[in-house]
Image (tube, rainbow, N blue to C red):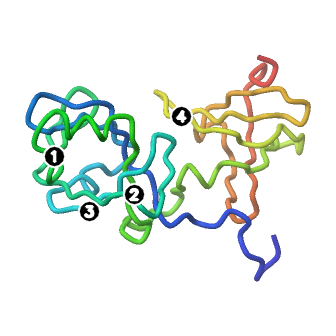
Amino acid sequence: MADGEADPRPMPDHLIVGHVSKPHGTRGEVFVWPLTDRPDEVFVAGREIRVGGTGGELTPQAPTTVVEAEPRPFKRGLLVKFEGRDDRASADELAGRYLLVPITDVAPLEEGEVFYHQLLGLDVVTVEGHRVGKVQEVYETEPAHLLEIRSDEGRLHLVPFAERIVKELDVKDGRIVIKPPPGLLEL
């Protein structure tokens, strides 16, 4: 991309920060899977959060809710109480929905950090210059997240998003350079 050109992947107005799994108990709490590396900055008492749809979409009529009290860690997620949700039935209305915050409310990224949505659609090439394909999805797994890459022939590759493999990441130019270990792209 030449200087002055607009990024074909503009930043969204809102970012998904969590997914409401289900109600918890009878007092209006819900179990939330945090979808942010900084849940302690997002899920705090008094924070306004938009409630999106089951596909992560945010409509103009999407309600805004407020975190009522400090969330409690529970298993691998959080128990969150939102204002106006005082019983299981009202909490159940949030089940399966995504939670979003304005991107302007998100702390700036550190050097070398990216939002995962910025990786979608990037071209992937090897250090030797061979085209692998385009990033279709990012999976949050342990010990490393995985990039799902679709080749021009329609073949899918799962490549760890790890420093030992990803040698260069240039979101502005829309490119990731990888050095896959022998056999990885043949799987």
Q: Residue furthest bottom?
A: 4
Which one is nearer the viewer's eye here, 154 or 87? 87
Q: Nearer the viewer, mark 2 or mark 4?
A: 2
Residue type highlighted by circle 4? His
- The answer to whether the residues at label 2 and label 3 have Cβ atoms under 8 Å apart is no
Q: CA distance from mark 2 to mark 3?
A: 12 Å
- The residue that label 3 is drawn on is 48
Q: Is residue 76 above or below residue 28?
A: above
| Sequence-wise first label, 2 or 3 | 3
Relative side of 28 to 150, left or right: left
Residue type highlighted by circle 1? Arg
Residue 43 lies, in percent from the top left, at: 24, 52
Q: Nearer the viewer, mark 3 or mark 1?
A: 1
Q: CA distance from mark 3 to mark 1?
A: 14 Å
Residue type highlighted by circle 3? Glu
Residue 162 lies, in percent from the top left, at: 58, 38
Mark 2 is surrounded, within 10 Å at the Cα level, by few (under 14), some (14 to 19) or many (20 or more) other residues, namely few
Q: Nearer the viewer, mark 3 or mark 4?
A: 3
Residue at (49% x, 46% y) in the render: 56
Residue at (48% x, 58% y) in the render: 59
- The residue that label 2 is drawn on is 62
- The residue that label 4 is drawn on is 145
| Occupied quadrant, residue 90 | top left
Which one is nearer the viewer's eye here, 45 or 132? 45
| Sequence-wise first label, 3 or 4 | 3
- The residue that label 1 is drawn on is 85
Residue type highlighted by circle 2? Ala
- The answer to whether the residues at label 1 and label 4 have Cβ atoms under 8 Å apart is no
Q: CA distance from mark 1 to mark 2?
A: 16 Å
